[in-house]
């Protein structure tokens, strides 16, 4: 045999082995990808295998399978054993060689190509379209199994049959495990909901029942106006109207004692003792009388049964009792405005805070800001938000109206989450609002829920914020008694104090029962959030602004600020300022004016940290010339972020401050990707070496910063690298002194606060 024929035979044999081998390996990899994808649903969680890691394994297995399939197709076409062309590898059922079985392999290959193409375009296609194609690609596995059994001369061998049937068994077992785990998760969730309803809903239902029995129709008490009884049907329908805080606040409530004598024997719930009901009724009425505003106590009301009850100061008043009707003749009252005047100036939110710092009650809240029911609702509310130009006040500055529209595009009933975690150590504005104006925040959340058709609002608060949690719990209970929120239910959730717990995907993951760690996106919360439903995650301050916009309109909101960045914002000032704390200023205000309103600086400063610990260092002289706008700050690579601003004293060691915070942030990472686990630890160690004078140069640290930037699974590494890189630039002279002499001569300091708790609890 000639050498040419021997070489050709060897090449043909190599192609035969390569074709069959790559096909088998591709089937095994595709099977493993299907198994991992089946088990990596939201219902399958394990602490040792985070969802992010499982998702990465699933993607890598799929990519390897596609790579081996491509080699399998190319070698099949190159092998001259059968007349198979390139078009037969792409267009199914055209090949004259075993068209059915070979066509099935082509179908599986095309489905995998569609999966790869849509994954590359996932950001443009949207989550829905990508998910549909993704699930369709799972059909490539059974098609590939059939292809392996019907194509090729090696299909008769036992080892290939073992591989094929083993793959089928693995997929069947994974599907069974997922179904079992899904059923258990649904059962546990149903049991938890039932327990929560029994724990929380039953007392509220009892309170609502007491209110229905203890309060009657709300009638306007007008001097000299005679109110005759309606016919029985109208009277019965009127008695079913609920009492509201608004009617209580303006004097539109009639006490329970106005009833006919026969109504004393009305029916009560089955199994409820009459004596207990009367006792609850009396307690509810005493509480109602105690909470009634002063203007309700200046009139006397006489029921139709002849008994009378005097309220208020007891002045002589004319009372007329006639059969079948009630005449009320009260002394003239000062006419209260139906809606309070809107706040003027820059103090939009802080104008309603009490001097003693305590939370406003519901009646005080309504008297200060007016009722949320008087403002824009549903579609009109979203339209006002869009016209106002309100952006998120949590750090991203995303237009709130666009976020509403993205959530509303979902098919399922959405959920509203109020992000009050505020895990940024340098910020305190959200906690201040929850502590002092809880009803304003809840108004915004309920209005958002009604506009989106949501029935559930979850207020997430850090576990360390005990005062804020107490204020919220009292506000939620007060609103439940007053029934001002319609069909929207409110729930307060306690979240860990970890730094990453405030990130929206981490918050949603925690509320779904997982750890408070960021998850891979997409899907984003507005696509799939709590319980798989579209979820609106909104900052506390943002919702408070939205509640005021609903009452006073978009034009009022735009009276301050600039055209591109309207409205006011809360800022947390700390460091070398005479009056640190929460300040409110119109966007566009000069930083120099803001510092003056905080009574100035206590001493010269070397720089400002703008935007919190994920923010940017800006030289002091440069910042004071800028305006409170992201457009101005962008010239220095900065943004307002969380609106936390720290003035670093000139005599404090800036390098030491940066090293302390970097070490804290590295310890607060989620630990789900290499840049966080290894990169941030290396940056923290390098920064500590620079601060202690043990580093040779800053170039190595700068290289680590460049390597980590933009490579994390979430934004945590980007925030840390921004903080460190800007500090190295602004304080370059101090860094040089540390490298040359071991220190810069400044005193060791602790200006930037570090929480004592440095992990999830």
Image: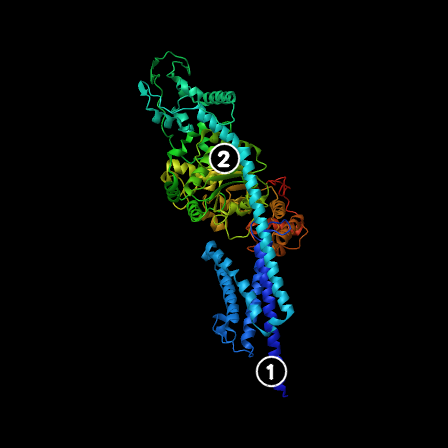
Q: What element carries label 2?
A: helix
Few, some or many C-alpha atoms within 10 Å of disc 2 (few <14, some 14-19, many ≥20)?
Answer: many
Query: Residue 292 is drawn in which quadrant?
Result: top left
Which mark's residue is nearer the viewer, 2 or 1? 1
List x then y, in percent, for residue 547: 42, 37
In this rendering, the count of numbered labels is 2
Residue 307 to residue 566: above or below: above
Residue lying at the far bottom of the rendered structure:
2
Relative depth, front residue between 287 and 735: 287
Quadrant assignment for the C terminus: top right
User: Is residue 674 rendered to the left or right of residue 398?
Assistant: right
Few, some or many C-alpha atoms within 10 Å of disc 1 (few <14, some 14-19, many ≥20)?
Answer: few
Query: Residue 152 is drawn in which quadrant?
Result: bottom right
Relative depth, front residue between 320 and 475: 320
Q: Mark 1 points at which residue?
A: 8
Relative depth, front residue between 570 and 431: 431
Residue 406 to residue 567: above or below: below
Q: Name the residue under label 2.
A: 433
Q: Is residue 455 visible?
A: yes
List x then y, in percent, for residue 623: 49, 45
List x then y, in percent, for residue 406: 44, 49
Residue lying at the far top of the rendered structure:
316
Residue lying at the far front of the rendered structure:
270
List x then y, in percent, for residue 670: 60, 48
């Amino acid at each position: 045999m000639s050498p040419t024929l021997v070489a050709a035979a060897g090449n043909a044999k190599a192609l035969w082995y390569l074709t069959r081998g790559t096909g088998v390996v591709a089937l095994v990899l595709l099977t493993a990808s299907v198994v991992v994808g089946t088990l990596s649903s939201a219902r399958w969680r394990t602490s040792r295998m985070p969802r992010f890691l499982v998702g990465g394994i699933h993607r890598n297995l799929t990519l390897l399978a596609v790579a081996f399939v491509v080699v399998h197709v190319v070698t099949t076409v190159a092998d001259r054993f059968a007349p198979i062309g390139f078009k037969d590898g792409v267009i199914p059922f055209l090949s004259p060689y075993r068209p059915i079985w070979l066509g099935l392999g082509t179908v599986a290959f095309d489905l995998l190509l569609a999966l790869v193409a849509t994954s590359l375009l996932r950001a443009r296609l949207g989550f829905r379209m990508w998910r549909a194609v993704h699930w369709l690609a799972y059909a490539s596995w059974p098609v590939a199994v059939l292809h392996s059994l019907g194509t090729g001369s090696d299909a008769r061998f036992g080892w290939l049959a073992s591989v094929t049937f083993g793959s089928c068994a693995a997929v069947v077992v994974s599907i069974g495990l997922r179904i079992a785990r899904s059923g258990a998760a649904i059962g546990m969730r149903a049991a938890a909901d039932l327990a929560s309803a029994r724990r929380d809903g039953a007392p509220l239902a009892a309170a609502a029942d007491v209110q229905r029995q203890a309060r009657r129709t709300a009638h306007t008490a007008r001097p000299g106006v005679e109110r005759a009884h309606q016919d029985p049907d109208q009277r019965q329908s009127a008695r079913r109207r609920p009492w509201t805080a608004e009617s209580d606040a303006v004097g539109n409530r009639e006490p329970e004692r106005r009833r006919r004598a026969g109504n004393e024997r009305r029916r009560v719930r089955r199994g409820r003792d009459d004596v207990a009901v009367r006792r609850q009724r009396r307690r509810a009425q005493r509480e109602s009388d105690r909470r009634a505003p002063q203007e309700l106590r200046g009139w006397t009301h006489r029921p139709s049964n002849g008994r009378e009850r005097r309220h208020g100061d007891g002045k002589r008043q004319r009372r007329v009792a006639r059969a079948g009707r009630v005449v009320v003749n009260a002394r003239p009252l000062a006419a209260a405005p139906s809606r309070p005047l809107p706040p003027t100036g820059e103090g939009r939110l802080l104008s309603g805070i009490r001097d003693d710092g305590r939370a406003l009650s519901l009646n005080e809240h309504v008297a200060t800001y007016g009722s949320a029911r008087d403002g824009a609702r549903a579609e009109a509310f979203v339209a006002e938000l869009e016209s106002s130009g309100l952006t998120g006040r949590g750090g991203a500055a995303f237009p709130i109206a666009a976020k509403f529209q993205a959530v509303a595009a979902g098919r399922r009933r959405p959920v509203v989450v109020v992000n009050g975690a505020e895990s940024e150590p340098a910020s305190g504005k959200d906690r201040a609002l929850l502590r002092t104006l809880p009803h304003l925040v809840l108004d915004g959340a309920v209005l958002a829920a009604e506009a989106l058709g949501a029935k559930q609002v979850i207020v997430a608060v850090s576990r360390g914020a005990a005062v804020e949690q107490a204020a919220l719990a009292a506000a939620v209970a007060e609103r439940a008694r007053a029934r001002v929120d319609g069909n929207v239910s409110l729930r307060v959730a306690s979240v860990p104090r970890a730094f990453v717990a405030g990130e929206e995907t981490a918050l949603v993951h925690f509320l779904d029962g997982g750890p408070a760690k960021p998850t891979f996106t997409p899907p984003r919360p507005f696509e799939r959030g709590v319980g798989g439903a579209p979820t609106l995650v909104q900052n506390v301050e943002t919702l408070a602004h939205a509640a005021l916009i609903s009452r006073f309109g978009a034009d009022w909101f735009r009276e301050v600020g600039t055209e591109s960045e309207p409205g006011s914002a809360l800022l947390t000032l700390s460091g070398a300022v005479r009056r640190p704390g929460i300040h409110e200023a119109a966007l566009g205000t000069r930083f120099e004016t803001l510092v003056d309103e905080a009574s100035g600086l206590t001493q010269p400063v070397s720089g400002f940290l703008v935007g919190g610990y994920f923010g940017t260092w800006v030289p002091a002289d440069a910042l004071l010339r800028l305006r409170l706008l992201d457009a101005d700050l962008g010239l220095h690579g900065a943004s307002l972020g969380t609106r936390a601003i720290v003035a670093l004293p000139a005599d404090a060691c800036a390098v030491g401050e940066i090293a302390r915070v970097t070490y804290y942030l590295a310890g607060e990472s989620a630990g789900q990707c290499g840049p966080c686990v290894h990169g941030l630890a290396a940056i923290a160690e390098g920064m500590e070496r620079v601060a202690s004078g043990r580093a040779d140069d800053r170039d190595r640290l700068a290289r680590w910063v460049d390597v980590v930037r933009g490579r994390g699974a979430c934004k945590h590494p980007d925030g840390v690298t921004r903080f460190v890189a800007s500090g190295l630039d602004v304080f370059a002279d101090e860094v040089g002194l540390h490298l040359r002499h071991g220190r810069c001569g400044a005193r060791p300091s602790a200006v930037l606060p570090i929480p004592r708790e440095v992990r999830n609890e």
